[in-house]
Amino acid sequence: MVFTTMSILTLVFGLIVGGGTFFTVSTIKNKNKVSKAEKLIENAKKEAERQKRDSLLEAKEESFKLKKQVDLEIKEKKAEITASEERLMQREQNLDKREEMLQERDSLLNEKDSNLSKLQKNIQEKEVKIDDLLKEEMERLEKISKFSKEKAHDLIMKRVEENMSIEIAEYIKEQEAEAKLHAQEKAKALVTSSMQRYASDVASEQTVSVIELPNDEMKGRLIGREGRNIRTIEAVTGVDLIIDDTPEAIVISSFDPLRREIAKITIESLIKDGRIHPSRIEELYDKVSKDMQTKITSIGNDAIYEVGLTKVNPELVNLIGKLKFRTSYGQNALTHSIEVAKLCGLLAGELNENIMLAKRAGLLHDIGKAIDFEIEGSHVEIGLEIAKKYKEDPIVCNAIASHHGDTEPNSVISTLVQVADTLSASRPGARNDSLENYVKRLEQLEEISSSFEGVEKTYAVQAGREVRVMVKPDEVDDLKSYKIARDIKDRIEKEMQYPGTIKITVIRETRAEEQAK
């Protein structure tokens, strides 16, 4: 028990001593902290005072600099204001001078106005006096001549009219002759210029096509057993197949170029294929015919593109393509139509006409030839029906109807189509003609020219494009020679068929001969 009490006392004493020690130590630490804090506060105050002094110094320096800069700017502004004031003063002085000058000018103008008024008044007074004098003179003249003013005027006008009527008639005659001369020269210049600007190669179409064979054995295969292959080819294609002694070649003959072309492509395909028998011939012919329709449309589109037209009916395009396989005197119809279209465009441009419409009329003028072997009637009538069917312009319709003179042309473009058609057909090499027809035409030309009374000799020259007629001078006078030329022209137009134009020249010549001995 004693030990426990002692232990408790000892423990309490230890706690007291420990608590005192802890309190003492804590107090010492707090005093140290307070002293340190006071030192830190004192140092902070000193640093703040130092920074305050530095800031004041910097502020003073900045204020001094700003004051100095402001003073400099004020001086510059004062200098600018002074210069502006000087300029304003100068401007005011100039304005004052200008005002003085204007005042002087006003005074001068007023003075001139007054002088002009005086002069005008004087002139008016003089005009009144002159009018009075003229009246007096006229009265005196009327008394002396015993003619009134109206009678004298009528007499003078009558004499002037009589004198001028002769001069006017002569002037009109001269102008008409000059106009005809210039019109002919202008027309020749237009045609020549157009022909020079459009140049196209000329190639005559033939009525036969030649196919080269790889060997002569192929001829026998084309003929077939007992001629069955050649009979099938001719029956299906509608052409004549000529197989003669010509080595490694056969000839296709037909007046229809479309049939001839289809037959040529069919036979060439058979030769390449190697299988030649009636069923294969018919099969290839059907295939080539279908391909040819596509080719015809392509040819028509190419022609339209070459000429430069737009908005053409697809069926009309197909008809234009068919012209590729039509000929006239050996001249390809499509080539001829394209040439006429381009010439019409050039001529229309020279005359300030509608170029596109002229080209369209030129391209379609022979469109009837595309199907004239399928429908009865001339190509002019068929072409006119086609143009109306596809609602072409009335000018185009008239150009088609009148390009061979069947109808009167009602527009300049229709006349241009006639001119271009003649140029394309008659230029050298464009069309061919057989020797027999050529000789017959020359003989008929000379026969018609020689049938008139008073004609001595006739000569057809320039390949039948001109006939020269020599007349007897003692039987035919100058006036009658003109009548003979007109009569020959009428008979040629009525009785002959010929391409282009024929010039008739009647020559009346008198020669007086003597021999000096």
Image: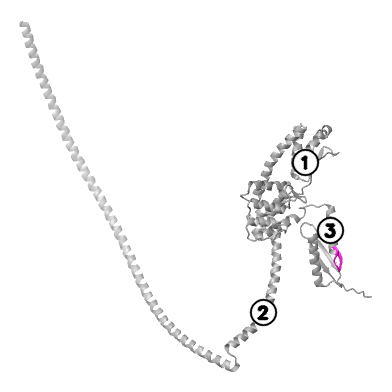
Question: Can residue 118 be found in the magenta stretch?
Answer: no
Q: Residue furthest front?
A: 376
Q: Is residue 268 left or right of residue 510?
A: left
Q: Which residue is mark 2?
A: 165
> Residue 203 at x, y = what percent?
76, 49
Residue 406 seen in the current view: yes
Residue 238 badge? 1
Q: Is disc 2 in contact with disc 1, using a CB cutoff of under 8 Å? A: no
Rate crowding at label 2 as few (under 14), some (14 to 19) or many (20 or more) other CA atoms within 10 Å: few
Spot occupied by residue 227 in the image (x, y as percentages of width and height): 83, 34
Check if mark 3's residue and mark 1's residue have beta carbons within 8 Å: no
The relative height of residue 406 versus residue 105 in the rendered view (above or below) is: above
Q: Amino acid at mark 1?
A: Gly
Circle 2 — which element?
A: helix
**Residue occupied by mark 3:** 442
- Extreme residue toward the left, this view: 2
Q: How far is the residue under mark 3 from the one under mark 1? A: 36 Å
Secondary structure state at the residue bearing disc 3: helix
Q: What is the x, y in percent for residue 129?
A: 49, 89
Circle count: 3
Q: For marks 2 and 1, give the CA distance.
A: 75 Å
Which callout, 2 or 1, points at the residue further toward the start of the chain?
2
SS under mark 1: loop
Distance from label 3 to label 2 (Cα)? Answer: 51 Å
**Looking at numbered disc 2 in the image, what kind of residue is underneath it?**
Ser
- Do we see residue 199 in this rendering? no
Of discs 2 and 1, which sits in the foreground? 1
Q: Quadrant of the C terminus?
A: bottom right
Which residues, given as a range, are shown in magenta? 450-459
